[in-house]
């Protein structure tokens, strides 16, 4: 299953702090050796200010009380930098902590900057220091402090690149604090800027979109409205394009989102098209499941894939989130996925067959006869299929309103006829005109 783990493909598109929750998940799932995960954590932390934490992990990993000299040196550096930053930022922070004074700020950056300069001798250097300090706090793992300072910094910052960078930082901090509502707001704000800003190169803009989609996975698979959100975002032309250009692995999340979202079934067709186009660049059991079902009409194959899908979901940091319910641990998304996927299989199957044997179906769905019958009854009630169950013979009889296969072929032939006619006309007429 480690083959299907996307962490190494996703991590390069994340802030290193965001990789941490992924490693925590993998550690819990025991998908890799514990030592490997701990080494990866130390590697991640080496570029941050969380030196004490790195030291703790080092001690656990190597069963020692000693820590390498470079960690000790790094700690000295970090403490020194903190002191110097605190000094430069002190006047501005004490201003921002005084509610009476903060009220004097107006929704006019130029005014505020002037006012701070004239009355408090706080200039651009101090404002820059606020950015550096916020970043420093973020690197220390103080995400709430960082979020506050970045918010205040953006209200005073006039450089659009810096402001964008601060917004990315704010988004990361909100994600790490699991403030999903605010994180979603920041995500939308960021998206608007990315879509409207003039980037130095189109490649740069593309990269920003790819980052945005990766970061959004945390939000969309946690926020209550995320299931619609992910489809709305990822299917926008420019974003779908970005996936197809340089982030094929995101197809797993798009596919999962479409499968579990009953209200967005209409995206299925486009999704299948994209999966087929990209099948040489990316496939996993989830995309293959859709391919087996809707391209090859291979029900056995789809059923087989479903078992692999389950494992993929359980081992995916975004999809495999579990919930403790008393003594019971459930993975809600897995259950929903399987339920919906079986529904997909059944629906496709019913479109092709007219009379379905319930025991055969029970076997295919790995259910008892009674479970299968109950399940079909619910399904028929909830779907657009028209069917009735004949309990005596143990069959479901589909009443097909839609065209059968022969009728479909004839219908397509009509279209073909029409198109040929138009085509011929388009060629013939100019030819005749030329001859004349
Ligand atoms: C806030 O600033 C005002 C004006 O400088 C000052 O009078 C007041 O004492 C300050 N309040 C606090 C809590 O520092
Ligand atoms: C995080 O930052 C806030 C705001 O500066 C500060 O009040 C808090 O003490 C910091 N927390 C830690 C653990 O340093
Ligand atoms: C949890 O486990 C205990 C002991 O095994 C059992 O007595 C209790 O009924 C269980 N609770 C639930 C909600 O299953
Ligand atoms: C069928 O379901 C049972 C439990 O409901 C499970 O133990 C078994 O592995 C499943 N078989 C297949 C082929 O999925």
Image (cartoon, rainbow, N blue to C red):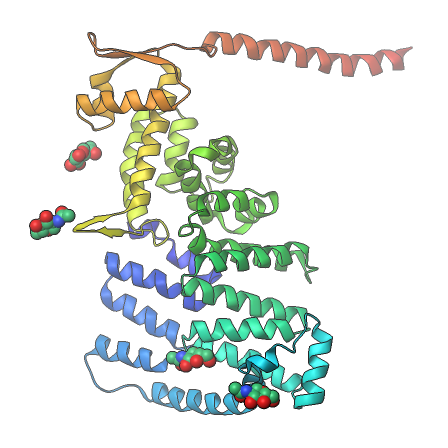
Q: Is residue 96 visible?
A: yes
Occupied quadrant, residue 383:
top left
Give coordinates of residue 419: x percent, y percent: 67, 14
Q: Residue at x 44, y 38 (%)?
A: 258
Which quarter of the rendering shows the C terminus? top right
Picture mark count: 0
Residue in front for this viewpoint, 142 or 334? 142
Q: Residue at x 41, y 10 (%)?
A: 400
Occupied quadrant, residue 107:
bottom right
Residue in front for this viewpoint, 287 or 218? 218
From what the image shows, is residue 89 above or below residue 361?
A: below
From what the image shows, is residue 432 above or below residue 288?
A: above
Give coordinates of residue 337: x percent, y percent: 34, 38
Q: Residue at x 41, y 65 (%)?
A: 176
From what the image shows, is residue 66 above or below residue 140?
A: below
The reply, left or right, for residue 89 in relation to residue 316 is: right
The reply, left or right, for residue 36 in relation to residue 140 is: left
Q: Is residue 90 visible?
A: no
Give coordinates of residue 432: x percent, y percent: 85, 11
The reply, left or right, for residue 372 in relation to residue 282 is: left
Residue in front for this viewpoint, 373 or 53? 373
Residue in front for this viewpoint, 337 or 64? 337
Give coordinates of residue 427: x percent, y percent: 77, 16
């Amino acid at each position: 299953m480690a083959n299907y783990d996307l962490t190494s493909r996703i991590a390069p598109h994340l802030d290193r702090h965001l990789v941490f929750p992924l490693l925590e998940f993998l550690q819990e799932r025991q998908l890799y050796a514990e030592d490997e995960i701990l080494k990866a954590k130390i590697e991640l932390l080496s570029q941050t200010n969380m030196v004490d934490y790195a030291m703790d992990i080092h001690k656990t990993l190597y069963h020692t009380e000693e820590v390498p000299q470079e960690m000790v040196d790094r700690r000295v550096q970090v403490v020194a930098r903190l002191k110097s930053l605190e000094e430069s930022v002190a006047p501005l922070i004490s201003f921002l902590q005084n509610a009476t004074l903060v009220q004097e700020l107006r929704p006019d950056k130029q005014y505020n900057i002037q006012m701070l300069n004239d009355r408090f001798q706080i200039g651009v250097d101090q404002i820059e220091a606020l950015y550096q300090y916020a970043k420093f706090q973020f690197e220390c793992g103080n995400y709430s402090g960082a979020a506050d300072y970045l918010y205040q910094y953006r209200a005073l910052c006039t450089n659009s690149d810096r402001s964008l960078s601060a917004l990315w930082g704010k988004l990361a901090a909100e994600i790490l604090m699991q403030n999903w509502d605010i994180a979603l707001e920041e995500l939308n704000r960021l998206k608007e800027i990315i879509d409207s800003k003039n980037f130095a190169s189109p490649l740069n803009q593309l990269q920003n979109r790819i980052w945005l989609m990766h970061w959004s996975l945390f939000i969309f698979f946690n926020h209550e409205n995320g299931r619609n959100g992910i489809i709305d975002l990822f299917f926008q032309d420019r974003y779908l394009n970005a996936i197809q250009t340089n982030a094929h692995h995101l197809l797993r999340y798009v596919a999962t989102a479409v499968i579990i979202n009953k209200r967005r079934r209409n995206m299925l067709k486009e999704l299948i098209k994209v999966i087929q186009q990209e099948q040489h660049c990316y496939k996993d059991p989830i995309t293959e499941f859709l391919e087996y079902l809707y391209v090859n009409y291979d029900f056995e194959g789809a059923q087989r894939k479903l078992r692999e899908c389950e494992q993929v979901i359980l081992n995916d940091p975004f999809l495999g989130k579990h919930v403790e319910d008393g003594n019971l641990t459930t993975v809600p998304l897995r259950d929903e996925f399987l339920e919906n996927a079986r529904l997909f299989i059944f629906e496709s199957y019913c479109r092709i067959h007219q009379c379905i044997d319930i025991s055969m179906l029970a076997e295919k769905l790995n259910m008892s006869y009674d479970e299968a019958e109950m399940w079909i009854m619910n399904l028929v009630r909830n779907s657009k299929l028209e069917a009735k169950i004949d309990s005596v013979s143990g069959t479901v009889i589909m009443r097909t309103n839609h065209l059968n296969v022969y009728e479909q072929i004839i219908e397509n032939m009509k279209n073909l006829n029409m198109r040929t006619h138009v085509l011929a006309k388009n060629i013939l007429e100019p030819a005749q005109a030329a001859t004349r």
